[in-house]
Amino acid sequence: MRTDNVTIGELTAQMVVEAKRLGYSDVSIWHNWMPRVGIVTKYYREQGLCVYDPAVTDEFLQEITRRCESGKVSENYFRKMRQITKRLNEFYLTGTLRMDVTLRGTKYVLSSSNERLVDLFVVHQGYGENTRDDAVWAVRKYLCHFERLGHETLATVTIDDVQRFILKVASEVKTSTLHDLFLYLRHFHTFLKEIGEDAPDGAGLFSHKVHREMPIQGYVTDEELDRILNVIDTSTEVGKRNRAIILLGATTGLRACDIICLKLTDIDWRKGEIRVEQRKTDQAVRLPLLSEAGAAIQDYILNARPQNHCSELFLKCAAPKTAIENASSIGTMFKDYERRAGIERQPFDGKGFHGLRRRLAKKLLVSGSSLAMVAQVLGQENMQSALQYLALDTGNLKECALSFSGIPAERREFQ
């Protein structure tokens, strides 16, 4: 936005229009926001000012901070005023409003030079969202380890130091975590070498093969899926959207991170298929849109989906009604419906939203589909990634078991 000489009154009026367009309720606007905006406006007038300036708003917040520290206003009052000043500055600078999300910090606090390395590494690698977070965690853990030992940079770290780090971390984490840690740190050291950063050549050390544990995970059964669908209230906007999401996951095997990125234009209604580029593999796939899932999506689009400028298929049901930003919210939603359906969950039981993907893989295998076909439908980069689903086809696995017929056995007593 950044309109020169816009007064605080003009900015407020424009922000109200934008808030209504995004779907904020009158209660949020007039009972929550506007009284606080009025306090900021009063400060401007007391200073003899009317043109909006983020610096003046920051000065106002600093005064509120001092009053809070001295006990003149409550912590709750301070938080509310901090939120509204952020919204005012954000709208002035960008012309839009978004839901405030405070990200959790990290226990691996780094120096500015190492923070710079992390930023450069992430941009260089171009990881997807979930992979990026895992990679950042691995590199932060690595760099923080050496900072705590007094190494301000990796220039003073030796190969022996890296080996000691490996021995230490191997005793602290699971095999699967160690596998990922090695992968990202190998990428990191390769990156350091490419940019000419002074650091030990640790890529070779982190190339050591770590075999990931491949436990047999469960899946969402047909009976459990029916129970979940039966507790969804499809008379509401939330229910229509969530039913469509769940059916789409169950019939296509799409990951939650791919579902929240689907665009309206990704659906070819004439051909009855969905086109999507999977975020985890960057692989483009075309999947059939089955009738039940297609009907649920149509019901959501025609009768519940907010009519706004967003191109994403599934939108938030609470203001601002924009794209769903975090795939974990899909898992939380699914878990809530499982609770309502009386489905008891156990840690690592495989019955989360991703369990719909394993359910589809099992059904494909039982129906006689080849492992190559399963890998193709699920968008796996290679068949090795799809091997885990073979363990779900217990019926055919039993046929592979050898009988004991023809094998002589004699009764003996153990001493």
Image: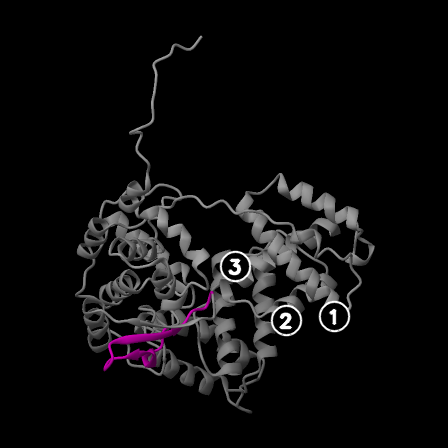
The kind of secondary structure element at disc 1 is helix
Residue type, label 1: Ile
Residues at marks 2 and 1, CA–CA distance in whole angstroms? 10 Å
In this view, which residue lies farthest toward the right?
156
User: Which amino acid, mark 3?
Assistant: Val
Q: Considering only vertical position in the picture, is 47 above or below 160?
A: below
- Identify the disc placed on residue 195: 1
User: Which residue matches tag 2?
Assistant: 124
Give the side of residue 91 with respect to residue 184, left or right: left
What's the magenta region? 262-280
Instruction: State the CA–CA distance, disc 2 to disc 3.
Output: 46 Å
Q: Which residue is mark 3?
A: 73
Residue flagged by tag 2: what amino acid is it?
A: His
Residue 402 location, quadrant: top left
Give the Cα separation between the discs numbered 3 and 1.
Answer: 51 Å
Instruction: Decide which of 234, 66 is in the foreground and name it.
Output: 234
Characterize the local packing of mark 3: few (<14), some (14-19) or many (20 or more) Cα atoms within 10 angstroms: some
